Amino acid sequence: MADFYTYRNEYAKSRRRRRLVVVVLVLLAAVCVAAGLYWQHGGKAPQAAPEATAEPTPAPEASAAPTPTPTPAAGEEPQRIVQAVDTAAWNTSTPVAQTIDTEYLNTDHRMIGVPMLGTVTSQYFDTVTFVGDSIASGLGIYETGYPNAHYATYISAGVNSFVNNTTMNNAVTGASETPMEAIVASQPDYVYILVGTNNLVTQGNEDSFLAYYERMIDMLREQLNPGVIFYIQAIPGVQETVIESKPGLDNARIYTVNDLLANLALRKGCYFVNIREVLTYPSDGSQIDEYETDGVHFTPSGYRAWAEYLATHTVWNRRSLYSGQNPYYIYGA
């Protein structure tokens, strides 16, 4: 059975033959045209010019005198056929005022999330470093299938804990460390960030939260290799009863903050992963009942569902290994 390369070679040969035939036909046509022109003009002797006759040639009839072109009066602009264009407004090297708003506004995090695309193998997560708080720690504490991933996740950590490089105990390894040093030492290819629930306990601090978050990404970019890919994970919702003791963790507010994080991801060149799709109800954003423990964290089954979601929602990369067929790789391309 002929493979792709045999078919491609046969098609290329056929295509070259057709081109050769076309070239030969064009050359023959050019030769024929040249021969015809030669016999028409060069093959016949030139005929003698007719002798002049004695009959007088009639004088040509007088034609009407041409209409003179009107000349403008002194100091008057000549009339233009095409309307004049004022080039002063655009033909200039001086800066002009910006008229288009390039900011991302009213971003819906559900529209920005990375779509489903194949399923990467667990080997993909060997070079992943998860960054975040105790909620993200469950991916390393429970058997989620990613034992070789690196974890810089800490109990009660907020985004300011990473920016200030506060010494904390790693919730997965138990080591006392400073977050930035631990992340840099892991030398990741991918960084998955989930932090913010502890910050949102305080109400009305969205601006400072986003400022710290942006600064954290800048610090990571400064200290990691240029090719590192960043994924910002959505902050999952909580159970409805949590708002009674922590009013800041209102699911409607968490939804709005995720919109702001998606906006941040667009500005900073990061990818946004909407893990809420698998962990919370779409109606009100609260945790799925079978996945919740204390209203904030998740059960082992919830973390396994979370891990499976991450494996099916990555941006295609030629280096990645996929379970089954590679979604975009074409054999022979």
Image (spheres, rainbow, N blue to C red):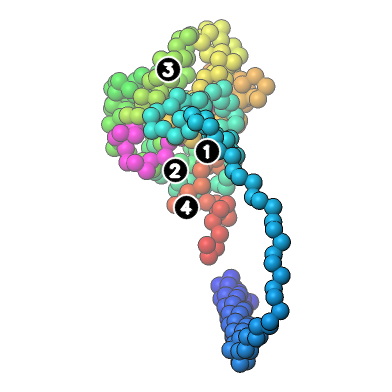
Residue for point 50% across, 38% down: 144
Q: For marks 4 and 3, give the CA distance.
A: 35 Å
- Residue 270 on the magenta segment: no
Tag 3 or tag 1, which sits nearer the N-term? Answer: 3
Of the pair 193 and 173, the residue shown nearer to us: 193
Q: For marks 4 and 1, give the CA distance.
A: 17 Å
> What residue does disc 1 label?
310
Q: Position of residue 203 (x, y in %)?
A: 48, 9
Asked whether the residues under the numbered discs 1 and 3 touch, taking CB atoms below 8 Å apart as contact, a structural biologist would say: no
> What residue does disc 4 label?
318
Residue for point 39% across, 25% down: 214
Residue for point 49% across, 41% down: 145
Q: Give the range drawn in magenta.
A: 220-234
Q: For marks 2 and 3, give the CA distance.
A: 28 Å
> What residue does disc 3 label?
209
Dot 2 lies on which element?
helix
Asked whether the residues under the numbered discs 4 and 1 touch, taking CB atoms below 8 Å apart as contact, a structural biologist would say: no
Indicate which disc residue 125 carries: 2
Asked whether the residues under the numbered discs 1 and 2 touch, taking CB atoms below 8 Å apart as contact, a structural biologist would say: yes
Q: Which amino acid does label 4 sit on?
A: Arg
Q: How crowded is mark 2: few (under 14 residues within 10 Å), some or many (20 or more)?
A: many
Q: Nearer the viewer, mark 1 or mark 3?
A: 3
Tag 1 or tag 4, which sits nearer the N-term? Answer: 1
Q: What residue type is labelled 1?
A: Leu
Q: What residue type is labelled 2?
A: Phe
Indicate which disc residue 58 carries: none
